[in-house]
Image (tube, rainbow, N blue to C red):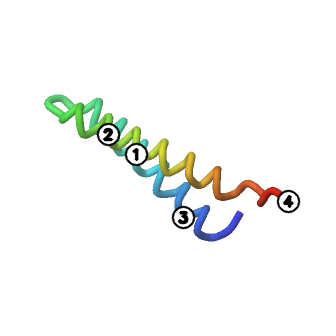
């Protein structure tokens, strides 16, 4: 795993945790929370795609 992939996964984890925290807050903006969770999933998926070996 490269440093960029690791940083992307840390950012994805921060987005998902922050979105879950915002979701559970009373009066929290659930739309922004869901967008944060989806963005974290997209970043993690992109990091996974970029970590795959190049096809021959």
**Foreground tag (1 vs 4):** 4
Calculate the distance from the C-alpha at mark 3 to the C-alpha at mark 4. 27 Å
Which is nearer the eye, 47 or 27?
47
Q: Earlier in the sequence, mark 1 or mark 4?
A: 1
Q: Residue furthest toward the front? A: 56
Where is mark 3, residue-wise? 7
User: What's the mark number on residue 35?
Assistant: 2
Q: Earlier in the sequence, mark 3 or mark 2?
A: 3
Q: Quadrant of residue 47?
A: bottom right
**Foreground tag (4 vs 2):** 4
- Image position, residue 3 (x, y; %): 62, 70
* Helix, strand or loop status at disc 2: helix
Q: Earlier in the sequence, mark 3 or mark 1?
A: 3
Where is mark 4, residue-wise? 56
Do labels 3 and 2 touch, CB within 8 Å?
A: no
Could you tell me which quadrant the C terminus lies in? bottom right
Q: Horizontally, is 44 left or right of 2 in the view?
A: left
**Foreground tag (3 vs 2):** 2
- Image position, residue 44 (x, y; %): 54, 48
Identify which residue is drawn at 71% across, 63% down.
Answer: 1
Q: Earlier in the sequence, mark 3 or mark 4?
A: 3
Calculate the distance from the C-alpha at mark 3 to the C-alpha at mark 2. 20 Å
10 Å neighbourhood of mark 2: few (<14), some, or many (≥20)? some
Q: Quadrant of residue 32?
A: top left
Q: Horizontally, is 23 left or right of 26 in the view?
A: right
Total labels drawn: 4
The answer to whether residue 38 is above or below residue 49 is: above
**Foreground tag (3 vs 4):** 4
Do labels 1 and 2 touch, CB within 8 Å?
A: yes
Where is mark 1, residue-wise? 39
Calculate the distance from the C-alpha at mark 4 to the C-alpha at mark 2. 36 Å
Q: Earlier in the sequence, mark 4 or mark 2?
A: 2
């Amino acid at each position: 795993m490269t440093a960029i992939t690791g940083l992307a996964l840390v950012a994805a984890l921060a987005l998902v945790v922050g979105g879950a925290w915002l979701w559970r807050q009373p009066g929290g903006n659930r739309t922004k929370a869901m967008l944060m969770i989806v963005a974290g999933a997209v970043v993690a998926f992109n990091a996974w795609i970029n970590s795959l070996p190049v096809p021959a």
